[in-house]
Amino acid sequence: MSVGIIRNPIFQEHQTGSHPECPQRLAAIDQKLESNGLLHELIPIDFEPALKEDILRVHSNEVFETVMKKAEEGGGWIDSDTIVSPHSGRVALHSAGAGLAAVKAVLNGEVD
């Protein structure tokens, strides 16, 4: 079985304070994969940021614009459990692009 991994320093820029969706969770995953000797067995998957049109396939323009505007304003809460940092808009585009690349890698048989 071939397993892919997508890593990029930009994901660390989604700074959310004490919210569970924070960069520390990614560092913990990397550390565990490394300490267990698994990181070198994973296949890196390259990706490009998603375009707005990609996002609009699954989210309304209102949701897209709300997140982007909140990020441009310096971040903050957009609802009771969703926080946006100043870089979250850019990070979200990269994250969505990573998800698209992961699906393509599976469909193309590059990973299982």
Image (cartoon, rainbow, N blue to C red):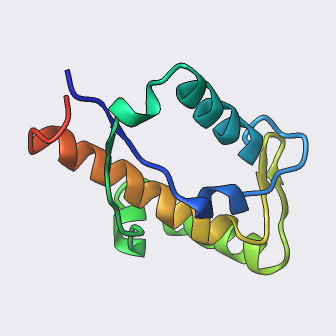
Q: Quadrant of residue 21?
A: top right
Q: Vertical placement of 14 versus 90: above or below? A: above
Question: In the rendered image, is residue 47 in sight?
Answer: yes
Q: Residue lying farthest bottom?
A: 72
Q: Residue lying farthest right?
A: 18
Residue at 55%, 30% (x, y): give it: 34
Q: Vertical placement of 103 versus 35: above or below? A: below
* Quadrant the N terminus occupies: top left
Task: Estimate the x, y position of residue 2 in percent, counting from the top left.
Answer: 22, 28
Count how many numbered circles sit on residues in the image.
Answer: 0
Q: Quadrant of residue 65?
A: bottom right
Residue at 20%, 45% (x, y): give it: 105
Task: Estimate the x, y position of residue 112 in percent, counting from the top left.
Answer: 19, 28
Question: In the rendered image, is residue 59 in sight?
Answer: no
Residue at 42%, 63% (x, y): give it: 55
Residue at 83%, 67% (x, y): give it: 75
Left or right: 53 in relation to 29: left
Q: Vertical placement of 21 versus 31: above or below? A: below
Q: Looking at the image, which is closer to me, 85 or 112? A: 112
Task: Estimate the x, y position of residue 16 in percent, counting from the top left.
Answer: 82, 51
Task: Estimate the x, y position of residue 86 in percent, counting from the top left.
Answer: 78, 71
